[in-house]
Image: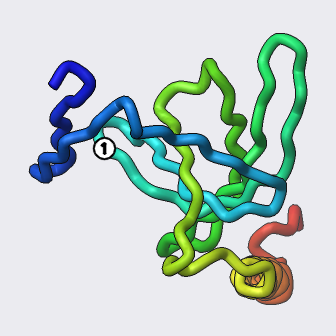
Amino acid sequence: MENKTIIEIQGVKMEVDFRTAKRIDEFKIGDNVKVLKKDGSTFKVIPGVIIEFVNFKELPTVQIATFESDYWGTHLKFVNFNAETEGIEITKVSNHELILEKSRVIDRLNMEIEKKRNELDEIVSKKEYLLKHFDKYFSKD
């Protein structure tokens, strides 16, 4: 029993034999990953893609592009993952999960661009209306 231990994750107890349990993750550029990110007192899982391995002498780093969507749009952020990174874990996306596809991400970003263009057009229209109809109130005459 000394090589075995019982672990519990979310109420599920598992007995693990450390003589045979081995986890080695292999990653390559372009791999889809899930990023577990601590957000205050909670954790959230964010989809990401490995974009670069930076072989710094002191602190080798994996750079990950993450994509978060919410009510306000799609946000592209970058995570630098290394031995000193706190509050972040990564794991591979399993075969049965939805992976990030370039076309889907581009579509989301194009929607975001269109939304921002519409907002800009609305502000320009307001300015033009103001200059056209309220010019007499702002003149020095």
Place of residue 4 in the rendered image (x, y in percent of width and height, measured from the top left): 22, 30
Q: Residue at x 66, y 57 (%)?
A: 66
Q: Residue at x 83, y 55 (%)?
A: 29
How was the colour assigned to the protein in this rendering? rainbow
In the depicted view, which residue is nearer to us: 92 or 74?
92
- Up/down of 139 relative to 8, above or below: below
Q: Quadrant of the N terminus?
A: top left
Q: Residue at x 19, y 37 (%)?
A: 7
Residue 134 appears in the rendering? no
Place of residue 114 in the rendered image (x, y in percent of width and height, measured from the top left): 77, 86
In the depicted view, which residue is nearer to us: 126 or 25?
25
The count of marks equals: 1
Place of residue 44 in the rendered image (x, y in percent of width and height, measured from the top left): 40, 53
Residue 96 appears in the rendering? yes
Q: Residues within 10 Å of mark 1 (few under 14, many from 20)?
A: few
- Up/down of 12 relative to 123, above or below: above
Q: Residue at x 26, y 24 (%)?
A: 3
The type of residue carrying mark 1 is: Thr
Q: Find the residue positioned furthest to the top.
A: 58
Q: Is residue 44 left or right of residue 94?
A: left
- Up/down of 127 relative to 133, above or below: above
Location of residue 116 by image quarter: bottom right
Place of residue 138 in the rendered image (x, y in percent of width and height, measured from the top left): 80, 67
Q: Quadrant of the C terminus?
A: bottom right
Secondary structure under tag 1 reads: strand
Q: Is residue 120 left or right of residue 45?
A: right
**Residue, disc 1:** 42
